[in-house]
Amino acid sequence: MTHSPETPDEQEEKKLAKNQDLTSTIHLSSLRSVRNQRNIEEIFSALTSEEREVLGQLPNRSSMLVVLAGPNKGSRFLIKGDLTSIGRDPNSEIFLDDVTVSRKHAEIHRSGDGFTVKDCGSLNGSYVNSQSITEERLVVGDELHIGKYRLTYFSGKGNS
């Protein structure tokens, strides 16, 4: 049985096949999906009557984060200044005492007539509606996920 010599193209194909890596890396962080807005009626129905009353009395140009799931469920954090720090550092305006939260995890900035959350290079990242963010404008009903904490955003009059 005689074997015919390989053509240059066949030799190149063999060389490429030998050097091909069978694994690859996909960087999912670069993919952005459409914002997953939560159903606001469903969110409000999960609130206690006391929480609904407190939210109804939010002052103009202020907002509130309410822990609806996870550790410290029921905790409320008023956001009224131009800058609100979130982290495990006891000096944070929003102190979240858990190792899944970085000392200086995130900040909330007043942005025109609303608020924007910005991750401060935290180890575990910050998420809005299950999407990893570096900076994101908040709208009513957004769920901010920091470490084990799931905080839902509500705004007072004069905010979006």
Image (cartoon, rainbow, N blue to C red):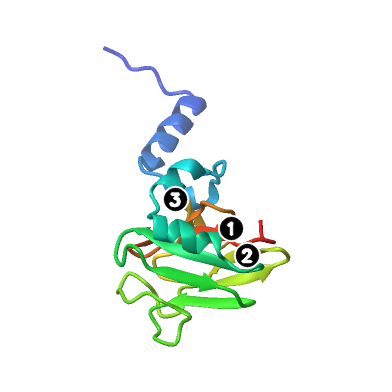
Density class for disc 2 (Cα within 10 Å; few <14, some 14-19, many ≥20) is many
Q: Nearer the viewer, residue 88 or 75?
A: 75
Dot 1 or dot 3: first in sequence order is 3
Q: CA distance from mark 3 to mark 2?
A: 18 Å
Q: Front-most of 147 and 3?
A: 147
Marks 1 and 3 sit apart, C-alpha to C-alpha, by 13 Å
**Mark 3 falls on what kind of element?**
loop
Q: Which mark is residue 92?
A: none
Q: Is residue 39 left or right of residue 71?
A: right
Task: Check the image and name the residue furthest to the right.
Answer: 112
Q: Which mark is residue 115?
A: 2
Residue sitting at x 50%, y 28%: 8
Q: Which residue is mark 1?
A: 138
SS label for mark 1: loop
From the viewer's perspective, is residue 122 above or below residue 46?
below
Q: Label 3 belongs to which residue?
A: 130
Q: Position of residue 95 (x, y in %)?
A: 40, 78
The amino acid on which the numbered mark 2 sits, given as a three-letter code, is: Phe
Q: Nearer the viewer, mark 1 or mark 3?
A: 1
Q: Residues within 10 Å of mark 1 (few under 14, many from 20)?
A: many
**Residues at badges 3 and 2 in contact (C-beta under 8 Å)?**
no
> Can residue 76 be seen in this snapshot?
yes
